[in-house]
Image (cartoon, grey):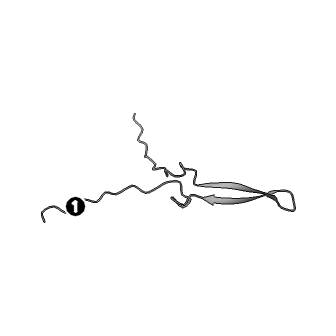
Amino acid sequence: MPQHVRITRVCRDCAGFASAMVTTGTRHLDGTRVTLRVTCPACKGVGTVAAVTTLTAPVGR
């Protein structure tokens, strides 16, 4: 029996990895590293993009 799979539109800028943790090189007083969370500006941290809609010209002007 065939399986129907929904096609997910993955963000082309981040390839679906919408956020990343980046270390700054410094450490907290307890010894853990200071990290920054960086999100993709194109998809705003979602990892997917909306379907592209096409505009058509009106017919019969």
Give the x, y percent position of residue 5: 43, 43
Q: Residues within 10 Å of mark 1 (few under 14, many from 20)?
A: few
Q: Is residue 33 above or below residue 7?
A: below
Q: Residue at the location (68% across, 55% down)?
A: 21
Q: Name the residue that disc number 1 marks.
A: 57
Q: Residue furthest right?
A: 30
Amino acid type indicated by mark 1 = Ala
Q: Residue furthest top?
A: 1
Q: Number of labelled discs?
A: 1
Which secondary structure, mark 1?
loop
Give the x, y percent position of residue 11: 49, 52
Q: Residue at the location (55% across, 51% down)?
A: 14
Q: Residue furthest left?
A: 60
Q: Quadrant of the N terminus?
A: top left
Residue 40 figure quarter = bottom right
Q: Quadrant of the C terminus?
A: bottom left
Residue 60 figure quarter = bottom left
Whether residue 58 sits left or right of residue 46 in the image: it is left
Q: Residue at the location (24% across, 59% down)?
A: 56
Q: Residue furthest bottom?
A: 61
Residue 58 figure quarter = bottom left
Q: Is residue 24 above or below residue 8?
A: below
Q: Residue at the location (42% across, 38% down)?
A: 3
Whether residue 19 sits left or right of residue 12 in the image: it is right
Give the x, y percent position of residue 19: 61, 55
